[in-house]
């Protein structure tokens, strides 16, 4: 049996909380020009238009600590790219014209605008019209030296957020939460912050209002992942506005809990690693008919209701190359100051950084199928127990035993 080390201690801190907004630039609904999807119509699906972001030009305009640059964080501009490149940019209040350097990334684009200290806003004037966007000052001081859990969330049960935070506090020693709320309608940011206030032991809790359309998923698991811009914009905003001086950062969704075979903190391991990055695969956790507490709208499912993960499945390509068809795509943790500035924080890896492709054997996350609002597809259907398919998860049970779920 693997010996679990004690949970990293967290000294009771003076807690700091905040609700933050972004300074975005969104074309009017009646604008004569809007973003045209790149995906062929036959692969869009019935709800594609309802999910697609036709109008956002800039998610946020993030200033630098020295006040000499503003980073415009944009979704993929597609047909709007040339008009944006042709636009003139003026710093306000000085009125001086600015030079801008454009960078094209996966489903994301950035303009690094040279400004003078004291710039409070930018005026963008070009073929799309004349617009003003305010500058968001960087808040690196808020998370300096913290071990931060980062996620994007919408309408998730508040008790899920609380349990998720408790797990990372007690099992991995997280000291800060940075949660981007993607336009929740069940509660507001202050109510979300109040729920997280009930979870003790964090020095910093920040909720960022992120009101953009998440975007349609791809066509199947592999094709046409080209139109979901919001999460990649969120990663860029978190990185360049809040987290440059964080001790380390963990990227995980609300339905994902990271386990360690050795009992080590994922933050500690990442900070001690040669490159300052740790990547790890995941396994699905299923509800089993007759063995898992029945789903009840009045009492939402909890992580501790579950005991079974999906048993590993290995197939071989050409009889030689192993494949793991049921394995969840990786997630990652990083020391922001050691991440190359040209690399892109992405959903399942850090693009453009080969070290992020090296996967840990110690860490593995559990992906809880029923901890979900079913926004992408219905995840509530249960399976009958099959010993060839489902396995009792002893590591998860031991990790749960380390958590104080009551505070």
Image (spheres, rainbow, N blue to C red):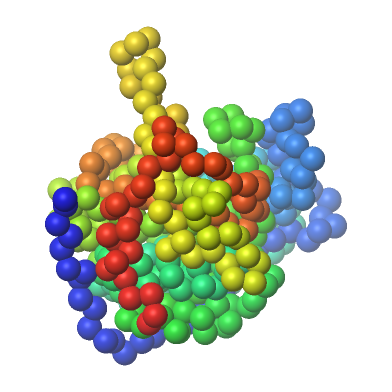
Tell me the quarter of the picture where residue 223 sits.
top right
Task: Report the front residue among 116 and 292.
Answer: 292
Identity of the residue drawn at 71% across and 39% down: 37
On the picture, is 305 further left or further right than 391?
right
How many numbered marks are there?
0
Q: In the rendered image of this protein, does residue 58 appear above or below residue 120?
A: above
Q: Is residue 8 visible?
A: yes
Q: In the rendered image of this protein, does residue 317 appear above or below residue 310?
A: above
Task: Report the front residue among 43 and 3.
Answer: 3
- Residue 43, percent across and down? 72, 30
Residue furthest out toward the top: 318
Identity of the residue drawn at 34% across and 11% down: 319
Residue furthest out toward the bottom: 14
Q: In the rendered image of this protein, does residue 372 appear above or below residue 196?
A: above
Task: Report the front residue among 26 and 361.
Answer: 361
On the picture, is 175 further left or further right than 370?
left
Identity of the residue drawn at 17% across and 60% down: 4
Task: Report the front residue among 210 and 399.
Answer: 399
- Residue 94, percent across and down? 54, 74
- Residue 306, percent across and down? 44, 56
- Residue 102, percent across and down? 50, 47
Q: Is residue 183 visible?
A: no
Q: Quadrant of the C terminus?
A: bottom left
Identity of the residue drawn at 27% across and 60% down: 398
């Amino acid at each position: 049996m693997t010996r679990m080390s004690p949970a990293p201690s967290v000294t009771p801190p003076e807690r700091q909380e905040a609700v933050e907004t972004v300074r975005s630039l969104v074309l009017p609904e009646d604008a004569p020009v809007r973003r045209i999807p790149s995906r062929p119509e036959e692969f869009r699906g019935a709800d594609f238009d309802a999910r697609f972001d036709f109008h956002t030009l800039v998610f946020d305009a993030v200033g630098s600590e020295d006040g000499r640059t503003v980073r415009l964080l944009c979704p993929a501009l597609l047909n709007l790219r040339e008009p944006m490149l042709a636009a003139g940019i003026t710093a306000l209040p000085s009125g001086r014209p600015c030079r801008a350097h454009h960078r094209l990334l996966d489903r994301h684009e950035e303009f690094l605008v040279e400004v003078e200290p004291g710039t409070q806003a930018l005026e963008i004037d070009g073929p799309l019209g004349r617009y003003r966007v305010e500058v968001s000052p960087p808040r690196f001081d808020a998370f300096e030296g913290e071990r931060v859990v980062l996620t994007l969330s919408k309408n998730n049960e508040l008790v899920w957020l609380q349990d998720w935070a408790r797990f990372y506090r007690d099992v991995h020693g997280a000291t800060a939460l940075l949660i981007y709320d993607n336009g929740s309608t069940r509660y507001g940011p202050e109510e979300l912050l109040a729920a997280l206030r009930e979870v003790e032991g964090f020095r910093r809790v920040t909720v960022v209002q992120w009101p953009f359309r998440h975007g349609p998923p791809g066509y199947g698991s592999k094709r046409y992942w080209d139109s979901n811009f919001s999460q990649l914009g969120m990663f860029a905003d978190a990185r360049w506005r809040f987290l440059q001086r964080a001790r380390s950062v963990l990227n995980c969704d609300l339905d994902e809990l990271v386990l360690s075979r050795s009992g080590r903190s994922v933050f500690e391991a990442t900070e001690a690693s040669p490159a300052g990055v740790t990547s790890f695969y995941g396994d699905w956790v299923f509800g089993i008919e007759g063995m898992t507490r029945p789903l009840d709208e009045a009492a939402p499912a909890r992580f501790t209701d579950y005991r079974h993960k999906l048993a590993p499945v290995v197939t071989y390509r050409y009889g030689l190359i192993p494949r793991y068809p049921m394995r969840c795509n990786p997630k990652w943790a990083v020391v922001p100051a050691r991440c190359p500035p040209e690399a892109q924080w992405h959903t399942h890896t850090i693009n453009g950084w080969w070290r992020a492709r090296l996967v840990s054997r110690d860490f593995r996350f559990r992906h809880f199928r029923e901890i979900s609002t079913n926004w992408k597809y219905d995840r509530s259907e249960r399976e009958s127990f099959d010993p060839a398919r489902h396995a009792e998860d002893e590591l998860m049970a031991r990790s749960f035993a380390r958590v104080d779920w009551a505070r």
